[in-house]
Image (cartoon, grey):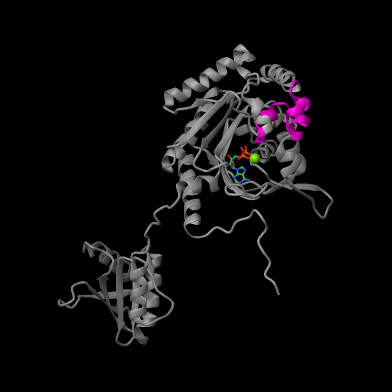
C-alpha cells in the first residue's frame, strides 16, 4: 500500500524551524501582554458570507483563494483565510461592544488556495492584533509601535521597512477611485486580464497587482494625496507624528493598497528584501467599514496580521535553551528503579532532568555528553532502600555544583532521609528511605 502524501502547500514543521516558529509566537505573546491586548481564540471556519461580504468579492482572496465547502447540512462554510472578518463577526454576535475599545490578539492557522512556493503556503499561520471601537489615530499608532517592538525583540528589525499609506476616508477614496478608472481605462488593453476585469468595479486592486503588465502603469497612476479631504489629511498627520514621537521610522508608499477591500485611512506593510518575492512580513490598516458590512453599526477599527513562517525565516536559528540540567545514569539493576523514582521527583520539583530509556551506563553517559547536558547524576543503590547519588560535571567548564546540589537535596528530602556524605565524596548525596 502506498503512503498518503501531505496536502500540497501544507507543512510539517520540525527541528530548528519549529523552534523558530515557537520563538516567534512566544515573543508575540509576551509583547502583546505588555501592550495589554487580550487573548482570544477564534473558530477555524465560518459561514462563507462572513468573508465574502467583508473582504470584497473582487479581491483575490474571495474570488479564487478560499477553501469553501458545503457541510452535511447544506450550508456554505469557509476555512478562514484571515482573522479580521471572524473577529468582527464575533464582536457583533457576542456583544463585545460593551468592552470597546477592545484590544485583542490571537494566532493560528489560515487557509488560502494559492500557488505554493517558499514563504507562501495553503495552510499558513499568522499573528494577529486588532483594536475595535477606537476612532483615534492613536490606536493606529499603538498597533504600529507594537509591530515595531515585536520585530525589534525578534532581532529582525534591520532591513525591514514600514511602508505607510493612507487611503483616505470614504469621500477621498471615491474621488481617487474615479481618477484611477479614468487613468487605467486609457491603457485598458495593455493590462492583465484580471485587471481589465477589475477596472470598473475595483480599480484600487490594480495597484496591488503582482502582474508585470499592470506594474508598468502603477508608478504614474493618480495618487491619493491629490484627493484627500482635510479631515483625512489631519488623521494621517496624527498617525505619522505619533510614529515620529514613538521613534518608529516609516517610509511613505503612495501606491500601497492592501489585498482586502475593507481598509480606510491608514494602510501599511512591513517589507524586506531578504525573503525574495514573499517580502511582506506584516500588513494591516484601518477598517472602519468592515463591521457595518456584516450588518453591525458603524464601528471604527484597526489591526494587523503577520505571517509566522516569514518571521521565523528571518529569525533563523534560535539558540535552543538548555533546560535539562542533569542526566541520571543508574549503575546496576537495583539502581534502575531508584533512578526512575528520583527522576520524577526532580522533574516535579522543577529540576530539568533526563533519563535515557535504556542502555549501559557508558552508553547513557555518551548520550548525555553529546546532548550537552551539563551534569550527570550517578545513581547507585545497594538494596533499593539506600541510594548514593554522585554529581559529576560533564559539559560545564566552571565547577559550581552547590546550587544544583542544594536543589536536588531539597526535592529529595521530602521523600528520603538524607544522611551526611562520605567525606571522600563531598559531592555525593546519600539517601535512606523514610520509614
Ligand atoms: P501577499 O501580498 O504576500 O500575498 P497578503 O497581502 O495576501 O500577502 P495579508 O492578507 O495581509 O497578506 O496577510 C498578512 C501576512 O500574512 C502577510 O504579510 C504574510 O506575511 C502572511 N501571508 C499571507 N498569505 C500567506 C501565505 N499564503 N503563506 C504564508 N504567509 C502568508
Ligand atoms: Mg495574498
Q: Could you tell me residue 10's position as x and y percent?
A: 63, 55
Please give left or right for residue 173 compared with residue 425 in the image.
right
Q: Quadrant of the N terminus?
A: bottom right
Residue at 41% x, 75% y is: 356
Tell me where the magenta segment starts and ends, as one range.
186-212
Asked whether 211 falls inside the magenta stretch, the response is yes
Q: Nearer the viewer, residue 158 or 195?
A: 195
Q: Nearer the viewer, residue 283 or 97?
A: 283
Picture layout, residue 313 above or below residue 225:
below
Q: Could you tell me residue 167's position as x and y percent?
A: 63, 23
Q: State whether residue 294 appears in this view.
A: no
Hey, which residue is sitting farthest top in the picture?
Answer: 230
Hey, which residue is sitting farthest right in the picture?
Answer: 74
Residue at 45% x, 28% y is: 249
Instruction: Count how many numbered circles sit on residues in the image.
Output: 0
Would you say the magenta stretch is mainly helix, strand or loop?
helix
Hey, which residue is sitting farthest front in the picture?
Answer: 190
Please give left or right for residue 213 compared with residue 248 in the image.
right
Q: Could you tell me residue 246's position as x and y percent?
A: 43, 26
Q: Quadrant of residue 231?
A: top right
Picture layout, residue 54 above or below residue 355:
above
Picture layout, residue 274 above or below residue 197:
below
Q: Quadrant of the C terminus?
A: bottom left
Q: Nearer the viewer, residue 61 or 143?
A: 61
| Quadrant of the image where one finds ligand 1 | top right
Asked whether 409 falls inside the magenta stretch, the response is no
Residue at 67% x, 64% y is: 5
Amino acid at each position: 500500500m502506498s503512503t498518503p502524501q501531505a496536502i500540497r502547500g501544507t507543512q510539517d514543521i520540525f527541528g530548528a524551524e519549529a523552534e523558530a516558529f515557537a520563538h516567534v509566537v512566544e515573543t508575540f505573546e509576551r509583547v502583546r501582554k505588555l501592550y495589554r491586548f487580550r487573548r482570544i481564540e477564534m473558530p477555524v471556519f465560518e459561514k462563507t458570507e462572513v468573508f465574502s461580504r467583508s473582504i470584497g468579492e473582487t479581491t483575490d482572496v474571495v474570488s479564487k483563494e478560499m477553501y469553501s465547502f458545503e457541510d452535511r447540512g447544506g450550508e456554505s462554510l469557509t476555512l478562514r483565510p484571515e482573522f479580521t472578518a471572524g473577529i468582527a463577526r464575533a464582536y457583533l454576535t457576542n456583544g463585545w461592544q460593551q468592552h470597546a475599545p477592545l484590544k485583542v490578539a490571537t494566532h493560528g492557522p489560515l487557509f488560502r488556495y494559492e500557488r505554493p512556493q517558499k514563504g507562501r503556503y495553503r495552510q499558513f499561520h499568522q499573528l494577529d492584533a486588532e483594536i475595535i471601537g477606537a476612532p483615534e489615530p492613536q490606536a493606529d499608532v499603538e498597533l504600529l509601535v507594537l509591530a515595531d517592538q515585536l520585530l525589534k525583540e525578534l532581532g529582525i528589525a534591520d532591513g525591514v521597512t514600514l511602508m505607510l499609506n493612507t487611503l483616505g476616508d470614504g469621500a477621498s477614496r471615491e474621488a481617487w477611485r474615479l481618477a484611477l478608472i479614468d487613468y487605467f481605462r486609457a491603457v485598458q488593453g495593455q493590462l492583465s486580464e484580471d485587471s481589465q476585469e477589475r477596472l470598473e468595479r475595483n480599480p484600487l486592486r490594480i495597484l496591488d497587482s503582482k502582474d508585470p503588465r499592470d506594474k508598468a502603469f502603477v508608478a504614474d497612476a493618480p495618487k491619493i494625496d491629490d484627493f484627500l479631504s482635510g479631515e483625512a489629511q489631519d488623521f494621517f498627520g496624527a498617525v505619522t507624528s505619533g510614529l515620529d514621537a514613538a521613534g518608529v521610522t516609516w517610509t511613505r508608499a503612495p501606491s500601497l493598497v492592501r489585498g482586502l477591500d475593507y481598509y480606510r485611512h491608514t494602510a501599511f506593510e512591513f517589507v524586506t528584501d531578504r525573503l525574495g518575492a514573499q517580502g511582506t512580513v506584516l500588513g494591516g490598516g484601518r477598517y472602519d467599514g468592515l463591521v457595518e458590512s456584516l450588518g453591525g453599526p458603524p464601528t471604527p477599527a484597526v489591526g494587523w496580521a503577520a505571517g509566522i513562517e516569514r518571521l521565523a525565516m528571518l529569525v533563523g536559528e534560535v539558540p535552543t535553551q538548555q533546560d535539562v540540567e542533569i542526566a541520571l545514569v543508574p549503575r546496576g539493576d537495583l539502581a534502575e528503579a531508584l533512578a526512575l523514582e528520583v527522576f520524577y521527583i526532580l522533574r516535579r520539583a522543577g529540576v530539568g532532568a533526563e533519563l535515557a530509556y535504556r542502555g549501559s551506563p557508558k552508553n547513557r553517559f555518551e548520550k548525555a555528553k553529546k546532548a550537552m547536558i551539563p551534569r550527570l547524576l550517578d545513581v547507585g543503590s545497594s538494596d533499593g532502600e539506600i541510594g548514593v547519588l554522585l554529581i559529576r560535571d560533564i559539559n560545564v567548564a566552571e565547577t559550581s555544583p552547590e546550587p544544583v546540589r542544594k536543589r536536588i537535596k531539597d526535592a529529595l528530602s521530602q521523600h528520603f532521609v538524607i544522611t551526611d556524605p562520605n567525606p571522600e565524596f563531598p559531592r555525593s548525596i546519600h539517601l535512606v528511605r523514610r520509614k
